[in-house]
Amino acid sequence: MRLKLVGIFMVLALAGAGAAFAHSGATGLVKERMDAMLEIGDSMKSLGRILKSGPYDPEVAIVAGDAIAGHAGEELTELFPEGSLQPQSEASPAIWSNWTAFRDYAGDLKSSALALKTMAEQGADSLALADAFGELAGTCKACHQEFRIKK
Ligand code: HEC
């Protein structure tokens, strides 16, 4: 359980880091994808809350899983047209030289978010949910390491 909690704290730090900076000046799709990422971050925070401090509430997990899935897969990749960079953007140009890997991460994000949602719907306990949460967090981290340049 301890390892899972470490993962949860890591993600909370990760989700909060972006929110601390207002990306003023970003426009259009770049702004849209930043907002989408912030919403994903908020959903991870609410998951962290019910899994860490409790009480575990499956409804919260279902809503969060659904929200993340809604910003993943194609909904995510279509916010990254080739060369869409602005000074405020933290997107790495590697996204477009390694598009398949980027798209795969976006797909993984969708499938792990949907898996978590389904587990919550089917009455899985919070330990099982914490596993699914760890899975999701791993996808955030992997994609960020490869394709996000922290400013
Ligand atoms: C497919 C790759 C990918 C996945 C998966 C991904 N991200 Fe991101 N994320 C990015 C990229 C690229 C940026 C930078 C976007 C920009 O600035 O143009 C970003 C930015 C962010 C930001 C900063 C938003 C801002 O502008 O303030 C947060 C917060 C964030 N992601 C949270 C998450 C969380 C939490 C997850 C997992 C549940 C996740 N991301 C999954 C690629 C990804």
Image: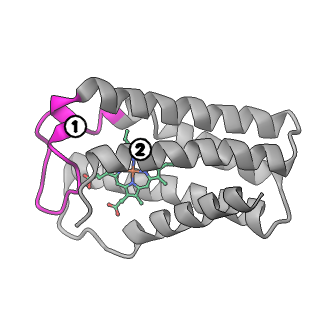
Q: What amino acid does circle 2 point to?
A: Ala
Residue at (37, 43) in percent of width and height: 143
Within 8 Å of ligand 1, the CB of disc 1?
A: yes
Residue at (10, 39) in percent of width and height: 83
State whether residue 81 appears in this view. Answer: no
Q: Nearer the viewer, residue 96 or 23?
A: 96
**In the image, is 98 to the left or to the right of 17?**
left
Q: Please give the residue where the numbered disc 2 appears in the rendered image.
A: 142
Q: Please give the residue where the numbered disc 1 appears in the rendered image.
A: 95
Specify few, some or many for label 1: CA neighbours under 10 Å numbering under 14, 14-19, or 20 or more: many
Q: Position of residue 43 (x, y in %)?
A: 58, 55
- Is residue 96 shown in magenta? yes
The quarter of the picture where residue 77 lies is top left
Q: Is 25 above or below relative to 67?
A: below
Q: Earlier in the sequence, mark 1 or mark 2?
A: 1
- Magenta range is 77-98
Q: Position of residue 131 (x, y in %)?
A: 71, 44
**In the image, is 151 to the left or to the right of 68?**
left
Q: Nearer the viewer, residue 43 or 95?
A: 95
Q: What amino acid does circle 1 point to?
A: Ile
Q: Tag 2, which secondary structure? A: helix
